[in-house]
Image (spheres, rainbow, N blue to C red):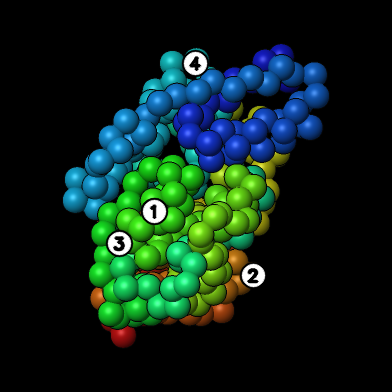
Amino acid sequence: MLPEKITVGTRRSPLALAQAELAGACLRRHFPDAEVVVKEFVTQGDKKLEWSLEKSGGKGLFTSELEASLLAGEIDLAVHSGKDLPTDMRDGLCVAGCLPRARANDILVVRQGIDIPASIASGSPRRRAQARKLFPQASFCELRGNVSTRLQKIADGTADATFLAAAGLQRLGISAFPGLEFREMPLTQLVPAAAQAAIALQCRRADAVLFAPICDAPTTHAFRVERTFLEALGEGCHTAFAVHYADETLLIFREDIGFFSERCRFPQDIPGIRESVSRILSKILNH
C-alpha cells in the first residue's frame, strides 16, 4: 500500500537540509499523492563542535538520534551523507539505497595569493595522509564546523588551506568565497572517503521494498562496494583509509600501503561483493 505521509529525518546543518530536500523532491516525484515532511535533529556530533573525531572517535555521532527515531516509528526515512553512516547499524534498519551520486572529488580551498600551502586545516586522517605526499612541508591542524564556518576560518587565516568535498559545495550552491581559491583535486591524487558524495536513505528493514525503487542503482552498488571494504578492514573516519569505485575502476589509499588502482567489476549481490573485496584485499595487503 502506498504511503499517505512520509516523514524524513535529517540533521539540522545547511548541507544536511539541502540533501534532505533532494530526497524529499525524489519522494514527491515517486509518491505524488503522499505528504512529505522533514523533521530536523541535532545530533551529538553537531553539539560537540570541539570534539576530535580522530582522537575520541566519531562512530554514530551524526546518526544515532536518527536511527532511534526510525525504530520508534517517528520518521520513515533518515537521510545521511553516505560517508557519515557507520557500517554496522541497529537491528531492524537498513539502507534502502542512495540518490544519484554527485562529484566525489575533494576541493583544496586555499587563501588567495598562496601557491603552496604551509599549513592545512583538516580533521580527516585520510585527507592528511594523502596531503602529506602532495605537500610534505605543510603542518596540519584540526578544523570543525559547517561548510561556511570552515571557509570563513580559512579566509580569516586559521590556516592556509583546507579540503572540502566538491559535492557538499555544489549542493550548497557555493562556487566561490571571498579571499579564497577552489582547486579541484583529481581522484587519483586524493582518493575520497568511502561513500563520499552519496546520499544514503536509511529505513526500517520492512520498508526497504517500498523505498528501494526510487534509488539510483549504480550509486547504490558503489556505496555497497566501498562500505564492504570499510567493513572488512574495520576502518572508519579515525583511520587513514580511502576507497572509491565508479565506472569499473577501483581506487584505494591506505597509509601503510599507499595508492592502489585496478579495473574490476563487482557482483551485484552482497556475498559476491564480499568475496571480491576479500580477494582484492588479500592481494594488496600481501603484496
Label placed on residue 156: 1
Amino acid tagged 1: Asp
Q: Look at 30% across and 42% down and name the residue there.
A: 59
User: What is the distance, in whole Å, between disc 1 and disc 4 at their CAs?
Assistant: 44 Å
Q: Earlier in the sequence, mark 1 or mark 4?
A: 4
Residue 190's x, y, as percent?
45, 71
**Badge 4 amino acid:** Gly
Callout 2 secondary element: loop
265 to the left or right of 42: right
**Res 109 visible:** yes
Going from the N terminus, do you reach mark 4 or mark 3 first? 4
Residue reaching furthest to the bottom: 287
**Amino acid at the residue labelled 3:** Pro
Marks 2 and 4 close (CB-CB < 8 Å): no
Residue 201, numbered label: none
Q: In the image shown, does 68 or 225 lie closer to the viewer?
A: 68
- Place residue 263 in its image quadrant: bottom right
Tell which circle, 3 or 1, labels the residue nearer the N-terminal end. 3
Sequence-first tag of 1 and 2: 1
Q: Residue at x 36, y 58 (%)?
A: 157
Residue at disc 1, secondary structure: loop
Name the residue carrying label 3: 125
